[in-house]
Amino acid sequence: MLRWLNPPSLASPPSLRDTHITRCNSTLYLSSTPWKAVGPNIYWLGLDENVIPPTTSPPTPFYAPLNASYPTRGRITEIMAISAALGSTFIRSHTLGISYGNPLSLFPRSATLNPAAFDPIDWAIFQAREYGLRLMIPLVDNFDYYHGGKYTWLRWSGYNLSRTTSEREDPQVQEFYNVNGKVWPEFQKYIKTWLTHVNPYTNLTYAQDPTIFAIETGNELCGPIWGDMDVPADWVREFGRYVKSLAPEKLFVDGTYGVNQTHLNIEEVDIFSNHYYPISVAKLRKDLDLVARVDKPYFAGEYSWLGNTAATDANLTAWLRELESSPTVVGDAFWSLFGHNIPDCNAFVEHNDGLAMQYGNPDHVAQIQLVRQHFLKMSQGLSIPANEALPSVPCPAPTFRTLSGRPLKYSWSS
């Protein structure tokens, strides 16, 4: 029997996994201890676009026009083990919450549920819980991606929007944010379906499960013009009220692409955020100054782990140290993490944006070491050498069943 001789310490003890993350002013807490959300973006956990599944009988679900398939349980479990080895406390994942408009989605069509799509989401949430990791989950995307976004809801509501880049400058896109319009009531139905779903692996609804510590309005939201931050405050407020009415213990994150000053006094928002391509200490400091006015936490939701244009480790080091030095920063998540193409443990999954961090790839070791050093500093106050050897992660990785911190059973996912 394979054994994991030196498993990384789990991010939170089993005794605390039923404890919700809370906020007091600009600090997050796990029980009475300050807590930081550090980890990767792993956008593909609920629905993938990077792997064409092998031919099987019966056939594995696959939607060729958008290259969509469900990730294997083995891939999901391994990436949780990798995240724990990195010193992560949480994961941000788009497709755990954004899943509509694709035949493999939760809602392939308006108000039409595809129960099969819940299984990879349920499994990912369960495995995050077993590995002591928390989840931040956006519920809509600004873009017309394979897993769905605001354009999906606009089309379902009768707006004529083609799948082209020009639609980003169409004034009709603002109707997505109209709380008195056609889209919002339909989107609410999806939010309720998602939050009230009972995960068969945990016997908890998504609203009840402390593993999901935060709900984010969406990914990089803006208005008709890219980067305009034109996300109406009344929509953010109404969204927050609705989520908290169904899941009062969840933290609520403003997913606008940038810190919109008109949102700063929205009571329902617990955390403000921005993304950084390329990483910019000056831009981060401006965002922190804005959020400091209202004494709320700040989270760097995405950034390039390859650094600035020159892609130097010095840039990445300076960026990580800036995050560590600010009392307002409650966490950060690099873009983005991948593992092996399990059941094939010899091949890494590739992604086409040039920012796929592959744990175990010798080309990425130096940057991964820097990120791990940062995560441990942020989450545990540990100071380790930047070149400390990375923990090994077995492939396939173990599925934990825990009670009082003791593994009750090892199984091997495929």
Image (cartoon, grey):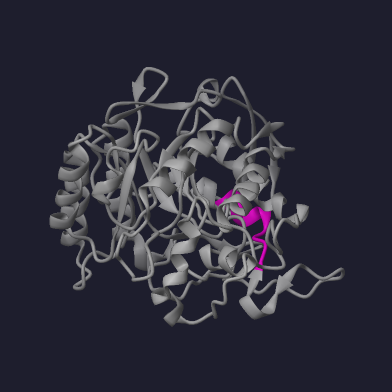
Instruction: Give percent across and percent down for residue 134.
Output: 49, 38
Q: Is residue 349 magenta?
A: no
> Given the current orientation, which residue lies at the most extreme right position?
58
Tell me: residue 331, above or below residue 341. above
Residue 382 placement: quadrant = top left
Instruction: Give percent across and percent down for residue 326.
Output: 18, 39
Q: Is residue 45 left or right of residue 231?
A: right
Magenta region's main secondary structure?
helix
Q: Which residues are magenta?
A: 69-78
Please identify the quadrant where the C terminus is shown.
bottom right
Q: Going 72% across and 68% down the picture, which residue do you hit?
A: 103
Q: Is residue 33 left or right of residue 54?
A: left
Instruction: Give percent across and percent down for residue 361.
Output: 43, 65
> Given the current orientation, which residue lies at the most extreme front position?
180
Q: Is residue 14 visible?
A: yes
Please identify the quadrant where the N terminus is shown.
top right
Residue 104 placement: quadrant = bottom right
77 or 299: nearer the eye? 299
247 or 115: nearer the eye? 247
139 or 69: nearer the eye? 139
